[in-house]
Image (cartoon, helix red, strand yellow):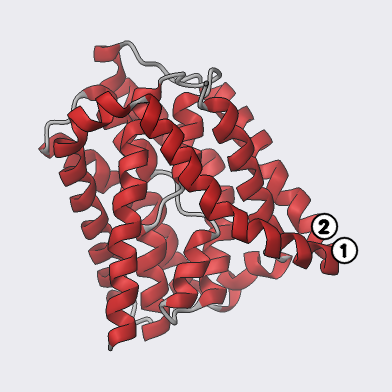
Amino acid sequence: MNTIWIVLPILTLLMFELGLNLKIEDFKLFKTRPKPVLAGLIGQIIILPLLAWFIGKAFGLEPIFLIGFVLIACCPGGSSSNVFSMLAKGDVALSVSLTACSSIITLVTVPLIMQWVTSAAGNAVMVHLPVGKLLMQNLVLMFLPIVVGIIVKKRCSKAADAMHRVLSRIAFPALIFLAGVFFFQNREAIIDSFAQLGLSVTVLILLAIGSGALLSRVMMLSVQERRTIVIEVGMQNAAQAIAIASSPLVFNNDVIAIPAIIYALMMNVVLITYVAIIKNR
């Protein structure tokens, strides 16, 4: 079974479901509350990819894993982060706005960052990035489903709410199914690399959370905003990273997707622990 024929429909479904939960106003929060939105975007778009590059280098990751390591750091989390923000009693409106903005911004930033990474590390393993094809894939699989979801939400709000309720329940099991299929097909490579990648991924997640918390305090954000920034910076979109890694149009290499699978596992463990600590308080 080719993983790409599973991940592409799942990613499209997730992006459509995200669009169903968005309104045009969600993109305008920056005008009324610029500080928390700016803090989240800086953490997601700038700090996390830089952390991934330096941590990957510090742990001596193989070039093929280093590319995948930075790739998952370039893909901010989707609608799942909104659920975690709600559970952590964070600022859900901010979470939705950051998800909306980052989903659009990364259509451009992911190709740019990954072009630099593959230029710096890809030659050693003969990995090159077709930037134009990645941009086209992002537009078709991410941008268009989001736009369609927003249009459906605006014109048929009741139907959109009904679809959102169903799709939101399907989204997480679909991701688990994707991770399970990918793990089964690449179990030997994942098991062999887990010791090194598991540690480096955990360090990245903890530093991402710490960076989000520090950035929030520097910008003097509220408690609810800080919780949301921590979650948004730490949570990444594994489906997007796997789609880019596995796609015949882009990398066409399942090994590059291995860091994303491990990140998805460790991310949920760390963030569930974070939410539990907040609830116990």
Rendered residue at 28%/23% (across/down): 64
Q: Residue reaching furthest right?
A: 155
Which residue lies under the disc numbered 1? 156
Rendered residue at 53%/39% (across/down): 108
Kind of residue at disc 2: Val
Q: Position of residue 48 (x, y in %)?
A: 32, 51
Residue neighbourhood size for the residue with mark 2, other residues' Cα within 10 Å, grouped as few (<14), some (14–19), many (≥20):
some
- Secondary structure under tag 2 reads helix
Residue 12 is at least partly visible in this image? yes
Mark carried by residue 59:
none
Residue neighbourhood size for the residue with mark 1, other residues' Cα within 10 Å, grouped as few (<14), some (14–19), many (≥20):
few
Rendered residue at 65%/45% (across/down): 13
Which residue lies under the disc numbered 2? 152
Q: CA distance from mark 1 to mark 2?
A: 5 Å
In the rendered image, the vertical position of residue 35 relative to residue 101, given as above or below: below
On screen, residue 35 versus residue 127, left or right, reads right
